[in-house]
Image (tube, helix red, strand yellow):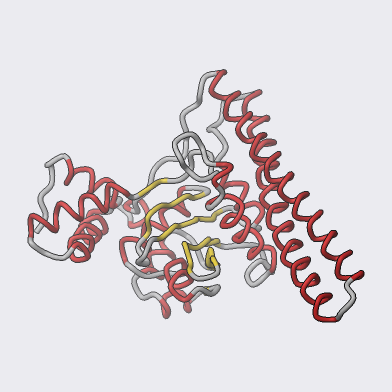
Amino acid sequence: MTPRARRPGRAYASGMPTGGGARELLASAERRAVVAHARSAHETHCAERHTALADEAPTQPLREVHARVAALHRATAACHLTAARLHDDHVSRLTTWTRRRDTPQPLFMAGVAAACGTGSVALTLVGATPDQLALAASDEPARAAQELEFLLGEGPARDATRQARPVSASGALITALWPGYGPALAELGMAEVAAVPLRLPDTCVGALAVFDPAPGVIGSAALTEVAEALTRSMILSPEILSPDGEPGLYGGLDVRAGVHQAAGMLAVRLDRPVADALELIRAHAFTEGSSAQSVAARILRGELRLG
């Protein structure tokens, strides 16, 4: 079996909902687009109002305050507008699909990839530690690449999250930075990668990784804008959560709850720290070329005993 064939992941041929389910998907996407456009319009109005107040302010300090507030509102408006365009793109893809559903259901992250100038992107969310809590990807290669980061404990998304700054590399530099991840990424056919953090004022909640983007994408403002839109307008936006509480990624987010549950069970059985148990699950998954989720599921079902 070739190394590429052994890389973990899942097929991206999503199940096709019935006619009613497809209509609900489309209606949900349309609602989210409307919400994002409305929020952008509201923030633009606020920016214009504070700009006018700055022009009318009687003192320089007051003018500066209103100017700063206007700038914040303009930045927020731009963030929501980027999110709105991502939703609009997904609406368009879903509309085409609902009329002729002989192809897999389009993934929202595929539109994110297009906005980033590539065919492959992956989004990871983290908790108090750099370990991935959830993952969304545009395609199988991107998912496999992020699974490698999780199993090996190294890679661009992990560094971008931990350091709260953009990270990028290509060619031999990938292996120089990440000795385990680099060769494995090359086996997936990827030669360049960049990751930008999903930042909040006092923390970082994850990263957006792009693979083999078009020239000029890495380091561009557009990539940062997409990351900010995903963070502020979607992942952390309670207004557009799905009924089951998932952020606005249209069912494309995989939560690693089972992996952490299995690590806790294994830690108790082995009387070891949870971090050690998690490393054991990762190592086993990487060795047999499966995903951490599948190994965790077998542990939870009592079909696999490690240690």
In the displayed structure image, the side of residue 35 where residue 210 appears, left or right: left
| Residue 241 position in % (x across, y down) | 53, 41
How far across and down, in percent of the image, does residue 7 sit?
35, 54
The residue that appears at 28% across and 53% down in the rendered structure is 289
99 sits left or right of 285 in the view: right
Q: Residue furthest front?
A: 58
Q: Quadrant of residue 118?
A: bottom right
Q: Say whether residue 264 is left or right of residue 6.
A: left
Of the pair 103 and 161, the residue shown nearer to us? 161
Is 246 drawn above or below residue 105 in the view shown?
below
Give coordinates of residue 132: x percent, y percent: 37, 59
- Quarter of the picture containing the C terminus is bottom left
Q: Kindly identify the residue that appears in the image at 55 percent across and 61 percent down.
A: 210
* Camera-side residue of 269 and 192: 269
Q: Residue furthest top?
A: 19
Give x and y (percent) for residue 84.
70, 47
Residue 216: which quarter of the image? bottom right
- Count of numbered circles in the view: 0
Between 214 and 198, which is closer to the camera in this rendering? 198
Whether 30 is drawn above or below 37: the answer is above
Which residue corresponds to the image point at 53% horizontal and 61% vertical from the top-left?
208
Position of 292 with respect to 267 (left or right) is: right
